Amino acid sequence: MIIYSYQFWEAFQDVTELDSVGNLRVFPLVILNVALVITLSRFVKYRSQFMAVYEEISREVDEMLNEMKSKYPQEVGATLERIRKGKKGKEYRRQQLKALEEEIEARLDLTKG
Protein backbone atom coordinates (compact mmCIF):
# COMPACT_ATOMS: atom_id res chain seq x y z
CA MET A 1 0.00 0.00 0.00
CA ILE A 2 2.91 2.35 0.69
CA ILE A 3 4.24 1.89 -2.84
CA TYR A 4 0.80 2.44 -4.33
CA SER A 5 0.31 5.54 -2.21
CA TYR A 6 3.66 6.89 -3.37
CA GLN A 7 2.78 6.22 -6.99
CA PHE A 8 -0.59 7.89 -6.54
CA TRP A 9 1.04 10.93 -4.95
CA GLU A 10 3.74 11.10 -7.62
CA ALA A 11 1.19 10.83 -10.45
CA PHE A 12 -0.20 14.26 -9.59
CA GLN A 13 3.14 16.01 -9.25
CA ASP A 14 4.57 18.22 -12.00
CA VAL A 15 5.84 16.11 -14.87
CA THR A 16 9.45 17.13 -15.05
CA GLU A 17 11.08 13.75 -15.31
CA LEU A 18 10.48 10.73 -17.47
CA ASP A 19 9.68 8.49 -14.46
CA SER A 20 6.66 10.59 -13.51
CA VAL A 21 5.04 9.89 -16.88
CA GLY A 22 5.55 6.17 -16.25
CA ASN A 23 3.64 6.47 -13.00
CA LEU A 24 0.69 8.01 -14.84
CA ARG A 25 0.54 4.92 -17.00
CA VAL A 26 0.60 2.68 -13.96
CA PHE A 27 -2.17 4.59 -12.16
CA PRO A 28 -5.10 2.62 -13.72
CA LEU A 29 -3.37 -0.61 -12.77
CA VAL A 30 -2.92 0.65 -9.23
CA ILE A 31 -6.62 1.50 -8.97
CA LEU A 32 -7.49 -1.93 -10.36
CA ASN A 33 -5.24 -3.62 -7.79
CA VAL A 34 -6.77 -1.63 -4.93
CA ALA A 35 -10.27 -2.54 -6.11
CA LEU A 36 -9.23 -6.20 -6.37
CA VAL A 37 -7.83 -6.18 -2.83
CA ILE A 38 -11.02 -4.59 -1.47
CA THR A 39 -13.18 -7.12 -3.32
CA LEU A 40 -11.11 -10.05 -2.07
CA SER A 41 -11.22 -8.76 1.50
CA ARG A 42 -15.02 -8.54 1.38
CA PHE A 43 -15.19 -12.06 -0.07
CA VAL A 44 -12.95 -13.41 2.69
CA LYS A 45 -15.01 -11.60 5.34
CA TYR A 46 -18.24 -13.03 3.92
CA ARG A 47 -16.71 -16.50 3.71
CA SER A 48 -15.46 -16.39 7.30
CA GLN A 49 -18.90 -15.29 8.57
CA PHE A 50 -20.49 -18.07 6.54
CA MET A 51 -18.09 -20.63 8.03
CA ALA A 52 -18.82 -19.40 11.58
CA VAL A 53 -22.57 -19.86 11.03
CA TYR A 54 -21.97 -23.27 9.43
CA GLU A 55 -19.90 -24.42 12.42
CA GLU A 56 -22.59 -23.21 14.85
CA ILE A 57 -25.30 -25.08 12.94
CA SER A 58 -23.14 -28.21 12.77
CA ARG A 59 -22.53 -28.08 16.51
CA GLU A 60 -26.26 -27.73 17.19
CA VAL A 61 -27.10 -30.62 14.87
CA ASP A 62 -24.50 -32.77 16.61
CA GLU A 63 -26.02 -31.91 19.99
CA MET A 64 -29.50 -32.82 18.72
CA LEU A 65 -28.23 -36.12 17.31
CA ASN A 66 -26.51 -36.95 20.59
CA GLU A 67 -29.74 -36.16 22.44
CA MET A 68 -31.67 -38.41 20.09
CA LYS A 69 -29.17 -41.22 20.75
CA SER A 70 -30.48 -41.31 24.28
CA LYS A 71 -33.10 -43.78 25.39
CA TYR A 72 -35.95 -41.38 24.68
CA PRO A 73 -36.64 -42.62 21.11
CA GLN A 74 -36.88 -46.20 22.39
CA GLU A 75 -39.21 -45.06 25.16
CA VAL A 76 -41.43 -43.33 22.61
CA GLY A 77 -41.43 -46.45 20.45
CA ALA A 78 -42.44 -48.60 23.40
CA THR A 79 -45.20 -46.16 24.37
CA LEU A 80 -46.47 -46.15 20.79
CA GLU A 81 -46.57 -49.96 20.70
CA ARG A 82 -48.42 -50.01 24.03
CA ILE A 83 -51.00 -47.58 22.62
CA ARG A 84 -51.42 -49.61 19.43
CA LYS A 85 -51.85 -52.90 21.27
CA GLY A 86 -54.21 -51.45 23.85
CA LYS A 87 -57.65 -52.99 24.10
CA LYS A 88 -59.41 -49.70 24.80
CA GLY A 89 -61.45 -47.81 22.22
CA LYS A 90 -60.31 -45.72 19.29
CA GLU A 91 -61.08 -42.47 21.04
CA TYR A 92 -58.82 -43.36 23.95
CA ARG A 93 -56.01 -44.29 21.53
CA ARG A 94 -56.44 -40.99 19.68
CA GLN A 95 -56.14 -39.09 22.93
CA GLN A 96 -53.03 -41.04 23.90
CA LEU A 97 -51.45 -40.48 20.47
CA LYS A 98 -52.28 -36.78 20.63
CA ALA A 99 -50.64 -36.53 24.07
CA LEU A 100 -47.57 -38.37 22.77
CA GLU A 101 -47.40 -36.08 19.74
CA GLU A 102 -47.53 -32.98 21.97
CA GLU A 103 -44.80 -34.40 24.20
CA ILE A 104 -42.53 -35.04 21.22
CA GLU A 105 -43.21 -31.58 19.77
CA ALA A 106 -42.42 -29.96 23.11
CA ARG A 107 -39.18 -31.93 23.37
CA LEU A 108 -38.09 -31.03 19.84
CA ASP A 109 -39.29 -27.40 19.97
CA LEU A 110 -36.23 -25.43 18.85
CA THR A 111 -37.62 -22.06 19.89
CA LYS A 112 -37.58 -22.98 23.58
CA GLY A 113 -33.79 -23.75 23.59
Image (spheres, rainbow, N blue to C red):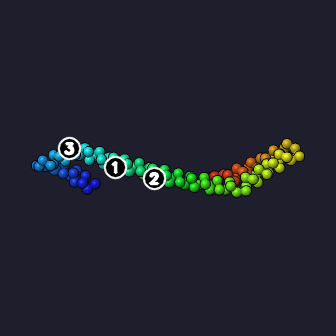
Q: Secondary structure at mark 3?
A: helix
Q: Earlier in the sequence, mark 3 or mark 1?
A: 3
Image check: 19 left or right of 47? left
Q: Secondary structure at mark 1?
A: helix
> Foreground residue, 36 or 89?
36
Q: Earlier in the sequence, mark 3 or mark 2?
A: 3
Q: Residue furthest left?
A: 16
Q: Earlier in the sequence, mark 2 or mark 1?
A: 1
Image check: 56 left or right of 41? right
Q: What residue sits right under mark 3 in the picture?
A: 25
Q: What residue sits right under mark 1 in the picture?
A: 37
Q: Label 2 sits on what residue type? A: Ser
Image position, residue 111 (x, y; %): 63, 52
Rate crowding at label 2 as few (under 14), some (14 to 19) or many (20 or more) other CA atoms within 10 Å.
Answer: few
Residues at circles 3 and 2 in contact by the CB criterion of under 8 Å: no
Q: Secondary structure at mark 2?
A: helix
Q: Which mark is residue 12?
A: none
Image check: 85 left or right of 15? right
Q: Which mark is residue 48?
A: 2
Q: Label 1 sits on what residue type? A: Val
> Foreground residue, 14 or 70?
70
Residue at x-position 53% and y-position 51%: 54
Image position, residue 20 (x, y; %): 15, 48
Between marks 3 and 1, how big is the CA–CA gap?
20 Å
Rate crowding at label 3 as few (under 14), some (14 to 19) or many (20 or more) other CA atoms within 10 Å.
Answer: few
Between marks 3 and 2, how big is the CA–CA gap?
36 Å
Image position, residue 72 (x, y; %): 73, 55
Q: Label 3 sits on what residue type? A: Arg
Residues at circles 2 and 1 in contact by the CB criterion of under 8 Å: no
